[in-house]
Image (tube, helix red, strand yellow):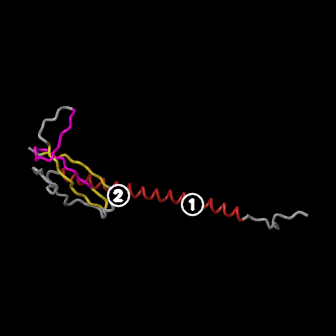
Amino acid sequence: MRRNDIDSNDGFSLVEILITVAIVGITFTAILGGLITTITASAYQRKAATADAIVRSAAELVKDSVRNPYANCAGSGAYSLAGLSVPAGFSVTIQGVKYWDGQPVPPGDMVKFTSNCDHGMQQISIQATSSDGQATETLQVIKRSVP
């Protein structure tokens, strides 16, 4: 006599169940790892974009000759970033000022900046950093004296 499939007591063996659980576990781990990587990369990109926006806003403020007039032999504290809106968790600073060496620039060459005092043009380095240090953006601005 043949048994009916419904009445059958056949089931999955322990080995089949363990293999299924292992496959599901590995798949879940891979998917979770991918999600964590995506979230981490997204958070870093968001911080980098915010730092970039901050440093660009600071550069515009430093270039503004009405709010920040040209200062001969200016140091890092000569130009103000007052009024700049900086989101929580970020900071922005002027890292340093270098000065044009006063030498004429041959065609195709670049202006040279040194630590010697002023000849009418300055290279100002501005840096924005996230509080956790993951994102740092630096921008250099050239500021000229107005005759």
Helix, strand or loop at label 1? It is helix
**Between residues 110 and 146, which one lies in front from this camera angle?**
110
- Residue at 80%, 67% (x, y): give it: 9
* 116 w.r.t. 6: above or below: above
Instruction: For marks 1 and 2, give the CA distance.
Output: 29 Å
Which residue type does callout 2 highlight? Gln
* 144 w.r.t. 18: above or below: above
- Residue 119 locus on image (x, y percent): 10, 43
- Residue 123 locus on image (x, y percent): 18, 47
Residue extending farthest to the right is 1
Q: Is residue 131 left or right of residue 43?
A: left
Q: Write down the residue under mark 1.
A: 28
**Between residues 16 and 46, which one lies in front from this camera angle?**
16
- Residue 134, located in which quarter of the rendered image? bottom left
Q: Residues within 10 Å of mark 1 (few under 14, many from 20)?
A: few
- Residue at 20%, 37% (x, y): give it: 110
- Residue 5 locus on image (x, y percent): 82, 63
Count of marks, rendered view: 2
Identify the image quadrant of the N terminus.
bottom right
Q: Are marks 1 and 2 in contact (CB under 8 Å)?
A: no
Helix, strand or loop at label 2? It is loop
Question: Which disc, if any, is residue 45?
Answer: none
| Magenta region, residue range | 108-127
* 43 w.r.t. 147: above or below: below
Q: Write down the residue under mark 2.
A: 134
Which residue type does callout 1 highlight? Phe
Q: Residues within 10 Å of mark 2 (few under 14, many from 20)?
A: few
Earlier residue among tags 1 and 2: 1
As for residue 2 lying within the magenta part, the answer is no
Identify the image quadrant of the C terminus.
top left
As for residue 119 lying within the magenta part, the answer is yes
- Residue 108, located in which quarter of the rendered image? top left
